[in-house]
Image (spheres, helix red, strand yellow):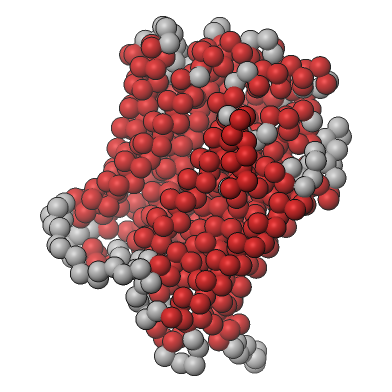
């Protein structure tokens, strides 16, 4: 007879914190490793000699606005440091948002859901619970760091990249330091706010502000000193490959423990279920869009829709506004021109290719939005919110199909609006493109969205815990393949495994409607199977 394991409350809480965060940590570690590690090998192929690299860097200096979402331009001079220029901004942003979301879910989210009450009825204090959950998260964070470091160091050991294991470790540390900073900050905001949603908002506002501060410092050389006031800027100043400056680790080492200690102190000072900042627990009833389950879903998605719409339009508009200037600046670099032409979908006109390049990132944003929305469906089931609908005369298939329709509608509307905005900005710059073809391409983009939703629905019907993760794996793979094919010669069958292979981003070419119909057909087929499986399986709680 097997012996049963007896866990102390502290050990059980650490184990719980680890299990709640390890899946996300595995994704983050792999994502950071591939985004930061694969760039060096691709750079060696695209720019094999120092002359081509100097031309590339000179072209970047003529387009300072692009630096908002990039690293230091000088890092583009060597294969070992090119990943810092190419991917450091977006990677540190992803890791920081993940750290904030995870810690607020562990601290305030568990309390909001009532999961801590049975524990607190015993001899365990709220401070002890918070500390042990955060220790469990630190284990997951360590796993993510190791995965990322192994991938970066392994890919950096490829010929001509010459990234040493020590430099790879410092680079990986630079990627994760902002995540540690905002994870600690999330422990503090979780005590200030009454709900997890508010705690996330309290953390996201300074996070995005500091990210924009760092982006502004990179875009305007005279304002480079602003980096000293941003955790994202500290990673730039760390300069882990070309000129390591380890002292820029110190600000995070100081502020992260301060935020943690403040959060742990405050959790013991406030009442259970209360917040440090005074907030009313009674609000006026607002019955808008509560007449049916479908109307409730629309209400729940109104704010996310406007947030995603505003962010997508702003980013697409920024890339479109610099299309003509960027194309003129990069015309002297044949290699970079070829890269943009491949990503943008046309070799005929570099300005049009640059606009198509912006369409590529629009597609990625919409795919991420789709995966996040599917994750919110899983969250409703995991937390027991779905039970409130199913106890009413509402069928499972009706509930699920209604949510899928809303996600499809959000993606379609944002895609069409983005196409119209790009057309307006391009026309204002004297770029002649057809509004009709632009909107056709924007609508055709929904084909890969429907296919991704089909994959997510299929996984949700069979393995609900892995639906969102599976969708993100598909998105990351599509991004990696699309970037590598612009620099390397990939086999055709590998290219066809990417969702982005099946959509045209050139705003002067009409979409392939037969391919679109195939994408829609496969997506609808997978959705049908997923909905049927959902009606047959048990509800899976968290």
Residue under the point 60% across and 61% down: 255
Taking depth in this image into account, of 459 and 413 the one nearest to the observer is 413
Compare residues 392 and 100 and report the one nearer the observer: 100
Q: Picture coordinates of residue 74 (x, y %)?
A: 73, 30
**Quadrant (top left, top right, bottom left, bottom right) of the C terminus:** bottom left
The percent position of residue 25, horizontal first and vertical second, equals 60, 58
Is 475 situated left or right of 448 in this image?
right
All told, the count of numbered labels is 0
* Quarter of the image that includes the N terminus: bottom right
Residue 416's image quarter? top left
Q: Residue at x 35, y 36 (%)?
A: 309
In the figure, 199 relative to 489: above or below? below
Report whether residue 449 is seen. Answer: no
Q: Residue at x 40, y 79 (%)?
A: 270
Tell me: residue 212, above or below residue 256. Answer: above
**Picture coordinates of residue 82, whole percent (x, y):** 73, 33
Q: Can residue 58 be seen from the camera position used here?
A: yes
Instruction: Please give left or right for residue 145 compared with residue 417 in the image.
Output: right
Near-viewer residue (328 or 351): 328
Quick check: 263 above or below 445? Answer: below
Which of 287 and 399 lies nearest the eye of the viewer? Answer: 287
Quadrant hosting residue 227: top right
């Amino acid at each position: 007879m097997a012996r049963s394991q007896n866990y102390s409350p502290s050990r059980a809480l650490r184990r719980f914190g680890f299990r709640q965060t390890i899946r996300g940590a595995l994704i983050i570690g792999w994502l950071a490793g591939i985004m930061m590690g694969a760039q060096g090998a691709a750079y060696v192929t695209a720019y094999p000699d120092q002359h081509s690299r100097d031309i590339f860097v000179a072209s970047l200096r003529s387009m300072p606005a692009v630096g908002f979402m990039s690293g230091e331009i000088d890092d583009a001079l060597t294969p070992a440091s090119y990943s810092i220029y190419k991917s450091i901004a977006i990677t540190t942003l992803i890791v920081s948002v993940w750290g904030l979301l995870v810690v607020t879910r562990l601290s305030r989210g568990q309390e909001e859901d009532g999961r801590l009450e049975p524990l607190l009825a015993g001899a365990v204090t709220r401070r002890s619970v918070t500390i042990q959950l955060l220790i469990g998260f630190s284990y997951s964070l360590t796993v993510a760091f190791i995965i990322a470091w192994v991938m970066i160091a392994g890919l950096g050991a490829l010929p001509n990249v010459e990234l040493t294991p020590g430099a790879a470790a410092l680079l990986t540390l630079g990627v994760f330091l902002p995540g540690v900073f905002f994870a600690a900050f999330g422990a503090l905001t979780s005590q200030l706010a009454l709900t997890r949603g508010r705690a996330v908002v309290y953390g996201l506002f300074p996070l995005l502000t500091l990210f924009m501060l760092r982006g502004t410092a990179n875009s305007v050389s005279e304002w480079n000193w602003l980096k000293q006031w941003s955790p994202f800027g500290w990673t730039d100043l760390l300069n882990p490959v070309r000129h390591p400056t380890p002292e820029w680790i110190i600000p995070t080492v100081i502020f992260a423990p301060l935020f943690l200690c403040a959060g742990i102190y405050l959790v013991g000072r406030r009442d259970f279920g209360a917040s440090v900042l005074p907030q009313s627990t009674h609000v006026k009833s607002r019955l808008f869009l509560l007449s049916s389950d479908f109307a409730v879903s629309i209400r729940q998605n109104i704010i996310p829709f406007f947030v995603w719409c505003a962010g997508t339009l702003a980013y697409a508009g920024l890339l479109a506004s610099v299309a003509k200037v960027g194309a003129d600046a990069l015309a002297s670099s044949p290699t970079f021109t070829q890269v943009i032409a491949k990503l943008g979908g046309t070799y005929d006109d570099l300005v049009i290719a640059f606009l198509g390049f912006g369409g590529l990132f629009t597609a990625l944003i919409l795919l991420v939005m789709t995966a996040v929305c599917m994750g919110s469906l899983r969250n409703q089931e995991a937390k027991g919110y779905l039970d409130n609908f199913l106890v009413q005369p509402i069928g499972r298939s009706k509930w699920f199909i209604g949510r899928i329709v809303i996600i499809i509608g959000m993606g379609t509307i944002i895609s069409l609006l983005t196409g119209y905005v790009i057309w307006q900005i391009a026309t204002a710059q004297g770029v002649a493109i057809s509004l009709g073809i632009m909107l056709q391409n924007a609508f055709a983009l929904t084909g890969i969205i429907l296919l991704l939703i089909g994959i997510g629905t299929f996984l949700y019907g069979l393995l609900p815990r892995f639906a969102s993760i599976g969708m993100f794996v598909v998105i990351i793979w599509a991004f990696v393949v699309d970037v590598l094919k612009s620099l390397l010669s990939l086999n055709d069958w590998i290219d066809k495994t990417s969702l982005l292979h099946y959509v045209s981003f050139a705003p002067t070419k009409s979409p392939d409607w037969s391919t679109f119909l195939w994408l829609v057909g496969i997506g609808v087929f997978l959705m049908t199977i997923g909905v049927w499986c959902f009606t047959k399986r048990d509800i899976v709680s968290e």
